[in-house]
Image: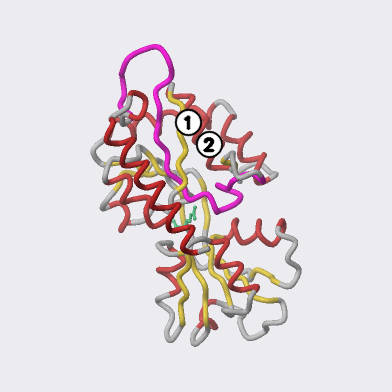
Amino acid sequence: MKKLMLICMAALLSLTVLAAGCGGGDKKPASSGGSGGSAKVLRVGTNADFAPFEFQDVNGKEYEGFDMDLIRAVAKEMGYKADIQNINFDGLIPALESGNLDLIISGMTINDERKQKVNFSDPYYKSGLTIIVKKDNTAIKKFSDLAGKKVAVQIGTTSAKEVRKINGVEVKELNSSADTFMELKAGGVDAVVNDRPVNDYYIAKSGVKDVRALDELLTSEDYGMAMSKKNPDLQKEVNAALKKLHENGEYDKIYKKWFGEAKK
Ligand code: ARG
């Protein structure tokens, strides 16, 4: 299974390289202005295993979620068509830096470390981290209780960074948040740390009955879309589009669709 995945990934990678090498018409980097006619393409990267922000529908074809609706609306507003690519979370910023993507939308938290490498849009969602444990685990009630425990997190995330600060914790860094939930279910870890809305969505929708999320919110984080520092015009365009969507009610519509209530 692992081997098959590796082969598939290698095949995909060489395809990407080929496509980039050909410099084919509509795969050119996004730039403002440009020729008229059909919509320009915005190459968007995401890690589509992070419901309700980005995930693939049951057939594994369409990308769905709050981020996906938002970026399609932003792109439309700017006269672009969003071409969404699914990449490992820790590969997103490198792909942007190497020019293979124009923009990242992936529930990505704005922080200083990332700001060294990318330009962020204005914040578009407020989040934070929570813990999930098995219901019968009474030993873990707050973040400091994770000391000496095994905790699963997704590689390259703020969860990984925060949990590593806890003394004597054993951190298991896995490829996706789905993997971290599976690890908890399988009993490989005592807890999972992840973004609150993703933990809540998992508990509400997965049908898993024996886990619960703790109330404590470890951090306060803002999500932003990331863009190359080489393309400051794009950042301006995206912020203008985002502002427009706030003004014309489109943002609220998308927010209500995924979170069931108006933004506080
Ligand atoms: N907000 C966290 C971070 O920026 C986690 C994001 C994970 N996103 C994803 N699509 N898997 O590090």
Residue at the limit of the structure toward the top, as seen here: 37
Q: Secondary structure at mark 1?
A: helix
Mark 1 and mark 2 in contact? Answer it, CB < 8 Å: yes
Q: Nearer the viewer, residue 172 or 248?
A: 172
Mark 2, secondary structure of its residue: helix
Residue 205 position by quadrant: bottom right
Front in this rendered view, residue 9 or 164: 9
Disc 2: which residue: 70
Q: Classify residue 180 by image quadrant.
A: bottom right
3D distance between C-alphas at marks 1 and 2: 6 Å
Disc 2 crowd rating (10 Å Cα; few below 14, some 14-19, many 20+) is many
Q: Position of residue 28 (x, y in %)?
A: 31, 29
- List the residue tagged with mark 1: 74
| Residue at screen point 54% across, 60% down | 195
Residue 56 on the magenta segment: yes
Residue 109 appears at what percent x and percent y?
43, 54
Q: Which mark is residue 197?
A: none
Q: Position of residue 37 (x, y in %)?
A: 40, 12
Q: Nearer the viewer, residue 212 or 88?
A: 88
Q: Which residues are magenta?
A: 30-58
**Callout count:** 2
At 59% across and 46% down in the image, what residue appears? 56
Task: Tell whether position 24 is magenta.
Answer: no
Q: Is residue 84 left or right of residue 207?
A: left
In this rendering, would 5 be left or right of 22?
Answer: right
> On screen, 253 above or below 129?
above
Label 1 neighbour load within 10 Å: few <14, some 14-19, many 20+: many
Q: Check disc 1 and give the amino acid type.
A: Val
